[in-house]
Image: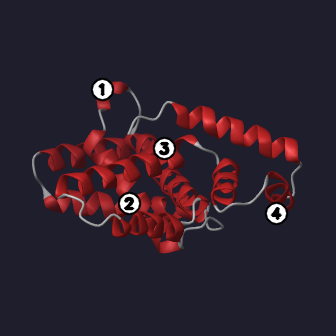
Amino acid sequence: MSENKSKADNILLDEIKNGSASALDEIIKKYRPTVEAIAVKYINSPLEMDDLVQEGMIGLLAAVNSYNADKGAKFVTYASRCINNSIQSAIKKQSRLKDIPQSSLVSLEEEILEKRVGLSAEDEYLAKESVSTLTNVLYEELSSFENEVLRLYMTGCSYSQIAEKLGKNNKAIDNAIQRIRKKLSGVAF
């Protein structure tokens, strides 16, 4: 029975590759319960159920576009993996966005650009690019703990104040700041 489903999926996928919108609709309708079943596993994540399903559907479409039957896996297996990966990626991205207070980054950028009266368009562009590069490094290179330590350090908190606020000892804060310095030292602006 599952062999018949696999053959039916392959026929639909071939039709989709030939431009059939109705075949795509049929695959989406057929696999929506699978997407919802996978999304339910992540119901306690920072994303709403509708967002989880939407991310799962994006994963399904990615599976439809990239599936290769010659690789040996059945489409249902491949699609399930793509759906799961898409949802997990969205959750990780959402979690990273919560690590750094967005308001302070944006306001800092605006404040820097507003205080520099008479910046040429080129200088303003370069300043924005530098802030963008730094923001990306902070998201990608620093852990959530390191981001929080850096945020508090940049607001003028001492090591002991940071340690108290984060429930750590001074040595843990010092170690985090040393790691931050090392990670940021190689960033070119």
Choose between 59 and 140: the one closer to the eye.
Answer: 140
Q: Secondary structure at mark 2?
A: helix
Q: In the rendered image, which quarter contains the N terminus? A: top left
The label shown at residue 165 is 4
The label shown at residue 57 is 2
Residue 154, by quadrant, is bottom right
Q: Residues within 10 Å of mark 4 (few under 14, many from 20)?
A: few
Point out the tag, 4 or 2, that comes first from the N-terminus.
2
Disc 4 and disc 3: Cα gap in Å?
24 Å
At label 3, the amino acid type is Val
Q: Are marks 4 and 2 in contact (CB under 8 Å)?
A: no
Q: Residues within 10 Å of mark 3 (few under 14, many from 20)?
A: some
Point out the tag, 4 or 1, that comes first from the N-terminus.
1
Disc 4 and disc 1: Cα gap in Å?
56 Å
Q: Secondary structure at mark 3?
A: helix
At label 1, the amino acid type is Asp
Question: In the figure, is residue 18 to the left or right of 32?
Answer: left
**Position of residue 10 measured from the top left corner of the image (x, y, whole percent):** 27, 42
Identify residue for label 1.
70
